[in-house]
């Protein structure tokens, strides 16, 4: 299987810090990611799953036992920032929905 892997260049549009810690390969029409520290290949889940792997977050991916401590911390911080942004977006969506349901608030002076 490893011989079937065709390296693919990571495009400059990919700004997530996790891209610096994996390699992208193509097998047929499918793209897979490979951890540069432990050589684990991810057949799905994208960069987020690779980031969880590097952050040693159990759940969606096995933890990387060879990741450098500073990289692990960077991935943890990135995941926490993503969670905070998602929570903020959910809160804004809830407030917007309430405003839509209740209708416009008229202020009489």
Image (cartoon, grey):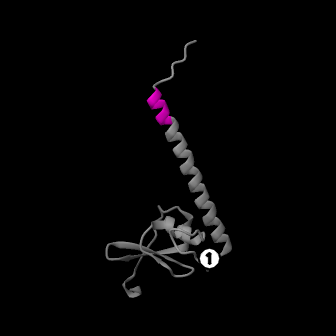
Which quadrant: the N terminus? bottom left
User: Could you tell me which residue is drawn at 49 percent across and 33 percent down?
Assistant: 98
Report x, y in % for residue 62.
Answer: 53, 75
User: Could you tell me which residue is drawn at 47 percent across and 24 percent down?
Assistant: 104
User: Is 87 rendered above or below residue 3?
Assistant: above
Report x, y in % for residue 89.
Answer: 53, 45
User: Is 59 rendered above or below residue 39?
Assistant: above
Q: Which residue occupies the extreme top position in the image?
A: 109
* Neighbourhood count class around disc 1 (C-alpha, 10 Å): few under 14, some 14–19, many 20 upward: some
User: Could you tell me which residue is drawn at 56 percent across and 55 percent down?
Assistant: 82
User: Is 78 rendered above or below residue 41?
Assistant: above
Q: Front-most of 77 and 99?
A: 99
Asked if residue 19 lies left or right of residue 31, the reply is: right
**Residue labelled with disc 1:** 67
What count of labels does the image hold? 1
Instruction: Write down the quadrant of residue 64 in the picture.
Output: bottom right
The magenta segment = 96-102
Report x, y in % for residue 66.
Answer: 61, 80
Asked if residue 16 lies left or right of residue 24, the reply is: right
Q: Which residue occupies the extreme right position in the image?
A: 69
User: Could you tell me which residue is drawn at 45 percent across and 67 percent down?
Assistant: 45
Instruction: Write down the quadrant of residue 107 in the picture.
Output: top right
Which quadrant: the C terminus? top right
User: Is 86 rendered above or below residue 96?
Assistant: below
Element type at mark 1: loop
> Does 99 lie within the magenta span?
yes
């Amino acid at each position: 299987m490893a011989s079937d892997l065709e390296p693919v260049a990571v495009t400059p549009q990919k700004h997530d810090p996790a891209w610096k810690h994996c390699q992208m390969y193509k097998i047929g029409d499918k793209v897979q990611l490979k951890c540069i520290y432990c050589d684990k290949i991810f057949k799905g889940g994208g960069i987020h799953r690779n980031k969880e792997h590097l952050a040693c977050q159990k759940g969606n991916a096995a933890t990387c036992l060879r990741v450098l401590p500073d990289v692990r911390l960077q991935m943890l911080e990135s995941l926490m920032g993503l969670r905070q942004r998602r929570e903020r977006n959910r809160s804004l969506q809830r407030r917007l929905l309430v405003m839509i349901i209740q209708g416009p608030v008229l202020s009489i002076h």
